[in-house]
Image (cartoon, rainbow, N blue to C red):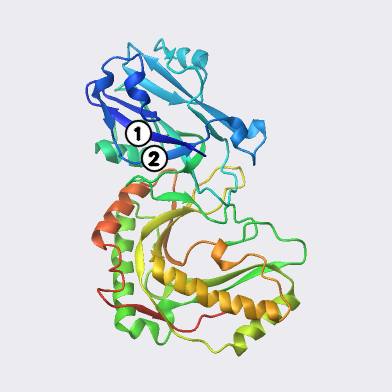
Amino acid sequence: MDQALYLYHSGLNGDFALLSQPTISTLNITNPESYALFQEDPVAFVARSASLLAQSDDDQTVALNVFWSESRKDVQTTTRSLDDLNSHSGDYVELLDAPLGYFFSSPMYSEDDRLVPLTLVYSDSDKDAITSPFNVADVAALFNDDSVFRDTGSVIGWGAKGSCDLCNLATSETFPSAGGADCPEKCDEGKKCANAIYHVGKDDEMPNTLGGQNFLANMKLAGEVVSSFDSSVEPEFGTKVHVSFEYWCCYTDDELSTIKKVLDDWEWEPQDVSYDRAEVRIDNPNSDGTVSHYSICIFLDEESNNKMLDYVGSIEAAIEAAGVKINSPRKKQEPYHSTLAVVDGRTYPVEEALKKINEMVPPSTWTGVDTKLTLTVPDW
């Protein structure tokens, strides 16, 4: 996806607009000079043409159109047709000769792009519509006013992840996890998945180190932030805190027995790691095709993640030497992380929560300053 999308705002028109740069200055609208970038970096990416979405059929792509209403002073970026839009009044007209871009109608699996939902949220009082990667709760947080926008929004499609300050969520690297956690494909009959996990919170050694104590304390504080937005969310803290070392996807019982023997015979070396920041991964779709399962995760920093990938790579090599092919290498799965909580991403203010978490625990301080968490031996 090669077309960057930017979110603009005009205080004079009371209007948000999702457009490409520098489109806004060339459009035949009122007060074009009043539109300024709401975020300096792109909030999402789409394809310039439907043919560029080679993984999808025509019925799996949607066009993003741009319209203007003089009476409402509203630029609306939407998948709706002009006739459909005007059936609800507004006297909209087309602003572009062609669609702004094309994107997926459903969150399809893609190794190259992490996908994000583009949500259309209406304000009846302001006669405005915002299309962006932000759900209703986060749009309301931008205005600090729940009453301006409707309680529900609609996901109009899925574009590629943006790079703005508030673009912290994306589909998992193994979405749709059809085989189980971090296993992208559904397993053949007679095969199943397994994993190895560092149980940081209930290990005999890890919770008693300085790095372990700092990390568990910060996870508890971050969990309180998560719950402050929705008391029904149950964050992982204390004995529940863990780091998944490896996910083995789609093996027979005999193959899993071979993997277990390699792990039993392995001479485990402690690994010192530190964490970067909180982000969100969208894990898997619901049975009806909607997506709500969003995991708030604390990811290892790049140096620590690369160290862990080197280490797990040596074990994967030993497993293959024992005669079992690695179906889904760890380097193609989610980067190393600790899951803080699972929330309903359709309604939970994920970006607002992430902002507060990353302010409360700045990047690279999760295990303390100049202190690391020592991962010892995972359970399998």
**Picture quadrant where residue 325 is located:** bottom right
- The answer to whether residue 236 shows anywhere in this view is no
Which three-letter amino acid code belongs to the residue tagged 2? Answer: Val
Q: Which residue is drawn at 39% across and 29% down?
A: 19
Q: In this view, does 216 lie to the left or right of 338?
A: left
Which three-letter amino acid code belongs to the residue tagged 1? Answer: Leu
Label 2, secondary structure: give it: loop
Relative image position of residue 156 (x, y in whole percent): 50, 32
Q: Residue at x 25, y 57 (%)?
A: 359
Relative image position of residue 219 (x, y in whole percent): 33, 68
Relative image position of residue 27 (x, y in whole percent): 36, 17
Residue bearing the label numbered 1: 7
Please state which of residues 318 and 190 is positioned toward the viewer in this rendering.
318
Image: 296 above or below 249: above
Q: Residue at x 26, y 17 (%)?
A: 31
Image: 208 above or below 289: below
Label 1 Cα neighbours within 10 Å, binned few <14 / some 14-19 / many ≥20: many
- The answer to whether residue 251 shows anywhere in this view is yes
- Label 1 close to label 2 by CB (< 8 Å): yes
Residue bearing the label numbered 2: 43
Q: Residue at x 69, y 57 (%)?
A: 186
Relative image position of residue 285 (x, y in whole percent): 57, 48
**Picture quadrant where residue 42 is located:** top left
- The quarter of the image holding the C terminus is bottom right
Q: How far apart are marks 1 and 2 (CA)?
A: 7 Å
